Amino acid sequence: MAKEPKLAVIPLGGLGEIGKNMTAVRFGENIVLIDCGLMFPEEEMLGIDIVIPDITYLLEHKEQVLGILLTHGHEDHIGALPYVLRQINVPVYGSKLALGLVQGKLKEHNMLDQVQLNTVKPRDIIQIGPFKCEFIRVSHSIPDAMAIAIHTPVGTLLHTGDFKIDQTPVDGEVIDLPRFAALGEKGVLVMLSDSTNVERPGYTMSERVVGNTFDETFRNATERIIIATFASNVHRLQQAITMAHKYGRHVAVVGRSMVNVMQVASELGYLQIPPGTLVELDEAARLPKNKVVLLTTGSQGEPMSALTRIALGDHRQVDILPGDTVIISATPIPGNEKLVARIIDQLFKLGAKVIYEAVSGIHVSGHPSQEELKLMINLVRPKFFIPVHGEYRMLKKHAELARELGIPAENIFVGENGQVFEFTRKQGRMTGRVTSGRVLVDGLGVGDVGNIVLRDRKQLSQDGILIVVVTMDKENNQVLAGPDIVSRGFVYVRESEILMEEAKAKVKIALDKCCNRGISEWAGIKSQIRDDLGKFLYEKTRRRPMILPIIMEV
Amino acid sequence: MAKEPKLAVIPLGGLGEIGKNMTAVRFGENIVLIDCGLMFPEEEMLGIDIVIPDITYLLEHKEQVLGILLTHGHEDHIGALPYVLRQINVPVYGSKLALGLVQGKLKEHNMLDQVQLNTVKPRDIIQIGPFKCEFIRVSHSIPDAMAIAIHTPVGTLLHTGDFKIDQTPVDGEVIDLPRFAALGEKGVLVMLSDSTNVERPGYTMSERVVGNTFDETFRNATERIIIATFASNVHRLQQAITMAHKYGRHVAVVGRSMVNVMQVASELGYLQIPPGTLVELDEAARLPKNKVVLLTTGSQGEPMSALTRIALGDHRQVDILPGDTVIISATPIPGNEKLVARIIDQLFKLGAKVIYEAVSGIHVSGHPSQEELKLMINLVRPKFFIPVHGEYRMLKKHAELARELGIPAENIFVGENGQVFEFTRKQGRMTGRVTSGRVLVDGLGVGDVGNIVLRDRKQLSQDGILIVVVTMDKENNQVLAGPDIVSRGFVYVRESEILMEEAKAKVKIALDKCCNRGISEWAGIKSQIRDDLGKFLYEKTRRRPMILPIIMEV
């Protein structure tokens, strides 16, 4: 009797990190992917634009990959698609909105007509190879987010995607708890669930709460209202628009990504905009101040974003006027706290009234708190449980939660990217590992910036660089020109002329040493210069600039 | 009748920022300073070690400066002393502990015997020129913190320093509210008050709460306990030591600054250490695990700190063992959130049980929340009010709070560093401005790193550098050697040979252009190379490395 194939779950991103979510689901020689996201660079990844998952494993099994299923349209779930599809061109399945956002990306990469995009709706079931893929509505901070159940011959895998349980969603589309319950009743082999907010007790508040806060703010504002939020939070945009309409204000949109999402979302019917509400920026400038709402990007204090430019007086069309009410309808993502604080300070200095984080009800999360996570586990009662979408401590905490609810410890797996989790009808275990990791995208370069380049950027950023150039007559082992010393990011040269002259003298001594000792290999001369000069500069300045000797041969 | 001199308050640091606190108080031609602190560099101050206040104004009035009064011994209140005293050597007044910490700094700077340090106690009154300076006990996260009242002929100035109102302080030394009340009764002309936590409603919890959490943790821990906290939080150290003694554990100390503070604090009698409790690290390593507590620095995830090195397996003497309980008894300072999270994740991975921020009662702030701030304002009822020690939005919020309590809006001043606030018995106003700002300290250099150097470091950190060297025969306008191209932090050169060859070709064309057109000024040739190569590289890579052409003349 042939052995039945196993179901394998192989996370290639999203475990031990928030970002670049991507999970391979393998049955026999068939693979589908759930999500294909990017991550924003960590602080030490100097100069890097975005980070995508290492897909070596997929490239090694390219012919087995049958499709990519999207849970929703956030960057950390769709952002790597252009890079992955360029190498593995398979059909993509997702909601109308998610695919609308994907289309924009593919257009930018000139790939739009090369990719097959398939729209799915909640409760749709798609057969892909041996996988019966079912989409199930959840609540999240973007419309039409879906969990994905993959029914296989050995059992059902359920990936919650990003979710929260919002009993009063803005679009009226409540999370499909009955379907989760039904799956649970029938039996789910393994569940993967969102760990982002596992450290928070209680329930995440409904998006509707923000609408109430908007209402109060609109009622009290006497001049312009400026709302900064995530462009993709279409429900939030809807609430702002609804409120503007209620209070007789017009809405203008600032910031490229906000304009883009507004267009996609309204074209696809996700936004209800009362006629006449939306106006162009220049028209808004001519309206009375108490008739205007500006919707803008920049809620994270990103240096190039609209709100930052507005706050710094760098925006072509919008200035802050005293009396403006600015609503920062977002929480700083870890790492952005200081950027956001600085923008808030700047807005206050310009005379704006700023409503931000400290006020409760101005932002709610899109992820489930502990009670929602418990509810999900209790509804589905999976045999095996893998916490995903979280940093390591979150995965651990989520595992602990599952244990408290009665899932046996040996059926809960806390793993890392690249870990293979294998399941039969009865058993589950962590088996081998596949290649996984981070690929850095810098400009057009994908993966061409590695540790050496980053290490150099780090050193350059701390103490700058000192370049020593000498032209040598190699035959006669004689200096023809130089040494010249040029430095950048080290000291302010005009005020350090003496230091530079002394440095030059040090180099001359090092060169003489080499010539006298007959050291004529460049390598030897270079390392002599590097050592002597480095020591001298450290003594004088306690800094360690990169020292780069260049020897020209005539 | 001669006009009575005015009382002027001139903040040189601490307004619009958290850090480098320093306030000049001037009456006639006499100046005393309150505090003399440093600030840790902002993210964009690449490579900078610390930031100190610009004291140009003081140097211009050097002979008027009579002394420096310290509210307490935290870095942001004493850290700039070695730099300032080197230029303005005046007596320093502070608590035994603050001066103990100052001594350590002066020793490092070889200045110990050049400075006059005067110990003061709460309720001490010191006459300095026309200033009668009174020290008043407050609660804070370091022992013997004091507010300072300066009585002058035109009225009393009260600077709260950093404070909280702790009804159950660990050392039993309760904040001297009666004295604040008495000053209020007699009449305070102007009060400066701590704005750090003004965004928090309610009361800050007592330090005692942390002791209770320690107690519970110690009771349940079966193996080693490792506690990371701020070295200067002597009360916290005391509570850890007390708890260790209670549960029969020995304490070893890890990390240079922790060892230093423990020594200073116990020598000066601030720490009660039961005999036999303290052991050396190597002795701790030989004890049973349930008999050991390690006290360590690194609660902010600082890259070189003991806890970070321990977590990364880089510490010479300490490893994390599965079963260890690690307590991070601190809240990440804004900007450090990701560093701390990474360390927590790493500790979890090594099998430790980590108790951190999410658990309430593991850390309490040393600054007053809204209700404490209100209490202080209501006790003192100053005629004029200046919120200090806070970023701009905090100063605004604190001003709002004061208005709500009935201080007239026109008597509340939200200002910036360098602003001069002038007071007579009756009137107060913001008048002129003096020079103020940030002086960057990088290694031994004080102020030699300015905007140009930082801008270069920024560019280098993002896209690296490309150096083009050519040796020219200037007389014949001919290239003798090169162009050679060297790059660092741009691309991984071994994988970019073609790009580098193409770049070299571009430079050759640019050189030919110049030679043909007879452009022989280096400036012209350099900018031609920079433009052509920059454009080429941006097209090819979408990156903008710094391009540095160097032309050697033979």
Image: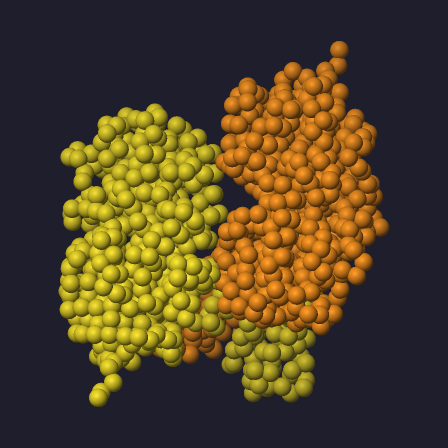
Chain colours: A yellow, B orange
Q: In the rendering, at what x and y percent does residue B166 appear?
A: 65, 37
Q: Residue visible at 67% across and 86% down?
A: A517
Image quarter of the N terminus of chain A = bottom left
Q: Is residue A541 visible in the rendered structure shown here?
A: no
Q: Nearer the viewer, residue A32 or A357?
A: A32
Q: Is residue B485 left or right of residue B395?
A: left
Q: In the rendering, at what x and y percent does residue B262 appear?
A: 74, 55
Q: Is residue B90 left or right of residue A274?
A: right
Q: In the rendering, at what x and y percent does residue A501 appear?
A: 65, 64
User: In the image, is residue B414 above or below residue A384?
Assistant: above
Q: Is residue A432 visible in the rendered structure shown here?
A: yes
Q: Residue visible at 31% across and 72% down?
A: A9
Q: Residue visible at 15% across and 65% down?
A: A126
Q: Is residue A79 left or right of residue B311?
A: left
Q: In the rendering, at what x and y percent does residue B451 appear?
A: 54, 50
Q: Nearer the viewer, residue A270 or B282?
A: B282
State which quadrant residue A507 falls in.
Answer: bottom right
Q: Residue visible at 59% across and 62% down?
A: B325
* Residue found at the far right of this picture: B113
